[in-house]
Image (cartoon, grey):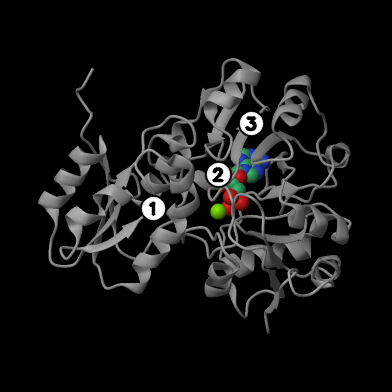
Amino acid sequence: MQTKLLRPSEDATALETAGALLRAGEVVGIPTETVYGLAANALDPDAVARIFAAKGRPQDNPLIVHIAALDDVDGIAAEFPPQAQALAQAFWPGPLTIILPKQDRIPMVTSGGLNTVGIRFPSHPMAQAIIRAAGVPLAAPSANTSGRPSTTTAQHVMEDLDGKIAAVVDGGPCTVGVESTVVSLCGARPRLLRPGGISLEQLQSVLGIVEVDRALREKIDDTEKVSAPGMKYRHYAPNAPVTVVVGPAQASADYIYAQLGENSGVLCFDECAQQFSGKAVVETFGPAEDKEEQAREVFDALRRFDDTDCTEIFAQCPSASGIGLAVANRIKKAAGFHVVDLTEGEA
Ligand code: AMP
Ligand code: MG
């Protein structure tokens, strides 16, 4: 299959073309504010099956359903409780996915066999325009090959999926850079299943107490049944194995420096790059204190290691406040939770 690269900046019909392909049951890579999405008609099981095939995604890993108007929730969720309405009011359109009980018209293949559905109203104007042009809600996981780092440019999407999907819409680089926050409202208490573009602190400001799923902290066994099915799989990983070093920037840089071997790579804060120059393959992902920039850069930096010949990667990691929780989660997952914590034992 020839994958079309559609450029709305040069071609006034690009978004309409994307909508027509989606209506016809095809799969299209689309820009969103978080990462690029791999979209198909969420109501069409055959179209959704093509997403799983293109990505090589396990069937039990559910997809998020994207909408372009608040009213669209009515056709997807079986109920829209007050807590969900409060979250929608505060954070939609934006990088938040809300898990609710699903209606029967959402096919089981879309929800990964669950009776619940993740819904997101993205803020990216092109994403909204494509959903409207398609005229249906769009199921869209991240537009990467399963297991690889997510994609934040149309070029990344082409790297992974050229020849496997009908088209990619080029909307430039994503402004958030990590995926949406996933919160479930299907249990007794709101539960954070995946940290993302909306911070835990922001969720707490609307919901009060929010439980944090175990899958955020530790590796989940492949055979376990978990509330965040996507979290148990290897994710975001470059080819070389990753070790994350948690702690203050200079302390973690010094620790990593002492570990460097012949073909080491280092994912580090901008300020620490100099220390590793000439000693390792160095990829930076923003200043130590700028977690927003780290979120925008982390996947691109992880991907760049695959163009090098390094055989092991050491990664610095931000602290867990704000969007740092999401950045740290992605790096730890890239490392399969292989973490050295220099702060352990500190009060
Ligand atoms: P991705 O689209 O690649 O960012 O993955 C979507 C993530 O959303 C998956 O990892 C799932 O764990 C999560 N998700 C989507 N729908 C549901 C659901 N119904 N219940 C729990 N988690 C969900
Ligand atoms: Mg993904």
Give the image quarter of residue 7. Answer: bottom right
| Nearer to me, 227 or 255 | 255
Q: Is residue 216 above or below residue 131?
A: above
| Residue for badge 1 | 285
Q: Is residue 342 above or below residue 104?
A: above
Confirm if mark 2 falls within 8 A of ligand 1. Answer: yes
Crowdedness near tag 3: few (<14), some (14–19) or many (≥20) residues, C-alpha within 10 Å: many
**Disc number for residue 184:** 3
Confirm if mark 3 falls within 8 A of ligand 1. Answer: yes
Q: Which residue is pictured at 60% across the width and 15% down the height?
A: 208
| Nearer to me, 222 or 283 | 283
Q: Position of residue 131 (x, y in %)?
A: 81, 55
Label 2's element? helix
The earlier-in-sequence mark between 3 and 2 is: 3
Crowdedness near tag 2: few (<14), some (14–19) or many (≥20) residues, C-alpha within 10 Å: some
Q: Position of residue 91 (x, y in %)?
A: 69, 32
Front disc: 3 or 1: 1
Q: CA distance from mark 1 to mark 2?
A: 28 Å
Q: Quadrant of ligand 1?
A: top right
Q: CA distance from mark 3 to mark 1?
A: 30 Å
User: Is 39 positioned to the left or the right of 192 in the image?
Assistant: right
